[in-house]
């Protein structure tokens, strides 16, 4: 990587013109309306758009008004031409994204690393850049599983990650719906549409997966473990675990130890 910027803001009319391009790739995450010259014509683009410019490519873009905001990265993989070839990210073409803020977080980390002087700096930057491109490629490859561009998908997906990160919390339909500021009935409808299971099924899944992790990596007593996973009593945990896994927690632990 050569240079990068996160959340760059221009309060006046902004225009970027590179007639012969630059010798490295340019990735932009554009957060405002803008104009990009594509195939010789200036075309209006909407917010939440990514565009990857190839090396030495004519580049012209400008703000649609008096405010422009983007993340930008100039990068290259020296001696590794096949890396980008293995992805399906098109060159010089706008890509609209349901989770641009998710990708923007990686740019923020890249910028922070770029201005540091730490051990393994270049390797960390290289790893972050690869993750960013993999994530971008994933959003391109799975637009339907990313909420179909719904404005609610980013907050719903964040909630889903919170459930799996903290399954022990007292998750209820009402509290989850309130956290994303929509009615409980509409929340349940959207959740199932986005993730193909109900929100409470998600909570159970997260708790069972956490329990399996503890059962396979610790000797924590079942009673304590049930509390760590968000269950009010041990019996409820044992019943739900057996219903999902076909084994009691103790049987699962014994089986795992025998296989290991």
Image: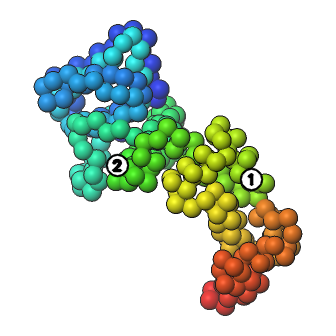
Q: Where, by quadrant of the figure, is residue 41 drawn?
A: top left
| Residue 41 against residue 132 in the figure, above or below | above
Question: Residue 31's x, y, as percent?
Answer: 42, 28
Viewed as shown, does residue 218 lie left or right of 192? right
- Label 2: element kind: helix
Question: Residue 171's x, y, as percent?
Answer: 74, 54
Q: Quadrant of the C terminus?
A: bottom right
Please tell me which of labels 2 and 1 falls first in the chain: 2
In the image, what residue occupies the spot 45% across and 49% down? 146
| Residue 138 against residue 50 in the figure, above or below | below
Q: Quadrant of the N terminus?
A: top left
- Label 1: element kind: loop
At label 2, counting other C-alpha atoms closer than 10 Å, the crowd grade (few under 14, some 14-19, many 20 or more) is: some
Question: Residue 247's x, y, as percent?
Answer: 70, 85
Viewed as shown, does residue 14 lie left or right of 193? left
Find the distance from the CA under tag 2 to the CA under tag 1.
Answer: 33 Å
The reply to whether residue 164 is in sight is: no
Give the numbered dot on residue 40. Answer: none
User: Which residue, as the protein is rendered here, is positioned at the far left?
Assistant: 40
Q: Where, by quadrant of the figure, is residue 214 drawn?
A: bottom right
Give the numbered dot on residue 172. Answer: 1
User: Which residue, as the protein is rendered here, is positioned at the far bottom?
Assistant: 258
Question: Residue 244's x, y, as percent?
Answer: 66, 77
In the image, what residue occupies the spot 81% across and 73% down? 236
The residue where tag 2 is placed is 140
In the image, what residue occupies the spot 60% across and 45% down? 186
The front one of 185 and 111 is 185
The front one of 83 and 150 is 150
Of tags 2 and 1, the one toward the viewer is 1
At label 1, counting other C-alpha atoms closer than 10 Å, the crowd grade (few under 14, some 14-19, many 20 or more) is: few
The front one of 37 and 3 is 37
């Amino acid at each position: 990587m050569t240079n990068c910027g996160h959340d760059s803001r221009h309060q006046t009319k902004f225009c970027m013109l590179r007639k012969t391009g630059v010798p490295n790739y340019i990735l932009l995450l554009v957060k405002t309306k803008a104009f990009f010259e594509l195939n010789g014509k200036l075309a209006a683009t909407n917010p939440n758009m990514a565009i990857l410019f190839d090396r030495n490519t004519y580049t012209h873009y400008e703000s649609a008004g008096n405010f422009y905001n983007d993340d930008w990265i100039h990068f290259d993989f020296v001696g590794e031409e096949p890396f980008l070839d293995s992805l399906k990210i098109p060159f010089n073409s706008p890509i609209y994204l349901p989770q641009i803020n998710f990708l923007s977080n990686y740019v923020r980390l890249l910028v922070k690393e770029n201005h540091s002087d730490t051990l393994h700096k270049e390797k960390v930057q290289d790893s972050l850049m690869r993750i960013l491109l993999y994530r971008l490629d994933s959003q391109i490859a799975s637009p339907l599983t990313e909420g179909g561009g719904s404005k609610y998908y980013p907050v719903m997906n964040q909630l889903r990650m919170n459930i799996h990160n903290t399954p022990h919390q007292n998750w209820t339909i009402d509290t989850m719906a309130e956290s994303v500021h929509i009615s409980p009935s509409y929340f349940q409808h959207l959740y199932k549409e986005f993730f193909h299971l109900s929100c409470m099924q998600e909570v159970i899944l997260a708790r069972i997966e956490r329990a399996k992790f503890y059962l396979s990596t610790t000797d924590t007593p079942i009673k304590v473990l049930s509390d760590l996973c968000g269950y009010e009593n041990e019996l409820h945990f044992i019943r739900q675990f057996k219903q999902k896994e076909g084994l009691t927690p103790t049987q699962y632990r014994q089986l795992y130890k025998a296989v290991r």
